[in-house]
């Protein structure tokens, strides 16, 4: 059974803040629509029905449910393209990104049930030509809902005719601009241009500081406020930062698990333009959809570090 358009009972429970048993009762009462896998018996819930359920009761989350469940798979060897796609997907707030470097990985990931909604593929793969990957997926019966974005990285790699089955083909001049790439990805995923913007109203807030888009490796140290010396070390990718906080993606931990109670995160960056940058943070939002991501707010940041971030803001 394809995962496209469906959620597990656990995912629905997290989205509407109820227990899994409550979700099952809602399905039994025909308030949301679900189907069962004939082999495993596992329930899958229609995303469309959950969206209607939220809208009918004026509950938050209905307008962004489909957007938050989108998945992008990137297959390329170019570090530059990888960084641009990471920044572009970050601009879409909540669209998950998974990456690989080979055509075989792309074929396996995209041909199976529950594959990504969008494949972004570079023409620099060494094992299987990008054109071959695209044409193979187009012939595969499970790829009918798969959108494909081909990014050229070098001249003469494959003739344009080989990419005719892709939905969109971009040159480096186009995908090199993060805003333009984000717009193309949003369009292929069916996301409205304003879906990525935060609402402004009586129950929301305007950003106090501008965000600066970056793509930097980060060392993370999770600790409990009452025991700061005992840490869980890990890594992440910083996708944007402001004087107030940052957004981290692809969070991984070397050992252990996140504490059950309150915890803080210490960040350390040793890459330009934030070399030897350190900050203590609290997590204000966290999501897991293919990879663990978190929005953090700085609770301990030196004036020097704050000024370094401020210096990165483009002049008006």
Image: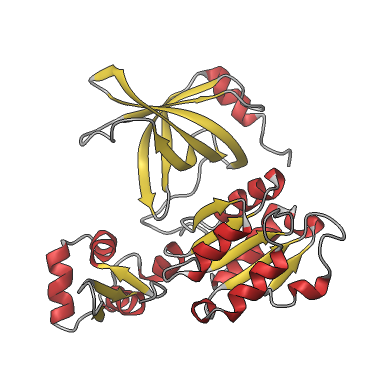
> Quick one: which residue is furthest to the bottom in this view?
30
Counting from the top left corner in percent of width and height, residue 44 is at: 27, 73
Quadrant of the image occupied by residue 283: top left
Q: Is 246 placed above or below 12 here?
A: above
Quadrant of the image occupied by residue 164: bottom right
Quadrant showing the C terminus = top right
Q: How many marks?
A: 0
Inspect this view and state whether residue 54 appears: yes
Q: Is 145 placed above or below 278 here?
A: below
> Quick one: which residue is furthest to the right in this view?
156
What residue is rendered at 38% in x and 71% in y? 3
Counting from the top left corner in percent of width and height, residue 305 is at: 56, 22
Counting from the top left corner in percent of width and height, residue 125 is at: 70, 55
Inspect this view and state whether residue 194 appears: no
Counting from the top left corner in percent of width and height, residue 289 is at: 40, 55
| 49 displayed left or right of 295 | left
Q: Is 304 placed above or below 258 here?
A: above
| 47 displayed left or right of 127 | left
């Amino acid at each position: 059974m394809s995962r496209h358009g469906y959620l597990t009972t656990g995912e629905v429970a997290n989205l509407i803040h109820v227990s899994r048993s409550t979700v099952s009762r809602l399905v039994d009462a025909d308030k949301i629509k679900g189907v069962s896998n004939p082999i495993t018996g596992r329930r899958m819930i229609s995303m469309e029905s959950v969206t209607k359920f939220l809208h009918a009761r004026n509950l938050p989350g209905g307008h962004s449910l489909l957007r938050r469940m989108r998945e992008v798979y990137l297959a390329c060897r170019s570090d530059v393209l990888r960084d641009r796609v990471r920044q572009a997907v970050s601009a879409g707030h909540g669209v998950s990104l998974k990456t690989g470097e080979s055509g075989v990985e792309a074929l396996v990931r995209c041909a199976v049930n529950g594959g990504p909604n969008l494949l972004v593929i570079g023409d620099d793969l060494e094992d299987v030509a990008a054109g071959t990957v695209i044409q193979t997926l187009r012939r595969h019966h499970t790829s009918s809902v798969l959108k494909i974005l081909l990014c050229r990285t070098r001249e003469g790699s494959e003739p344009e005719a080989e990419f005719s089955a892709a939905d969109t083909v971009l040159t480096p001049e186009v995908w090199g601009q993060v805003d333009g790439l984000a717009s193309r990805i949003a369009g292929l995923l069916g996301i409205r241009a304003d879906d990525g913007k935060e609402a402004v109203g009586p129950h929301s807030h305007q950003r106090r500081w501008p965000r600066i888009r970056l793509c930097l490796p980060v060392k993370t140290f999770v600790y409990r406020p009452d025991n700061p010396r005992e840490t869980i070390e890990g890594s992440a990718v910083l996708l944007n930062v402001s004087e107030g906080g940052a957004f981290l993606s692809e969070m991984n931990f070397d050992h252990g698990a996140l504490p059950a109670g309150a915890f803080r995160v210490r960040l350390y960056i040793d890459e330009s333009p934030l070399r030897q940058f350190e900050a203590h943070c609290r997590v204000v939002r966290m999501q897991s959809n293919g990879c663990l991501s978190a929005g953090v707010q700085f609770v301990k940041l030196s004036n020097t570090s704050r000024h370094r971030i401020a210096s990165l803001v483009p002049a008006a």
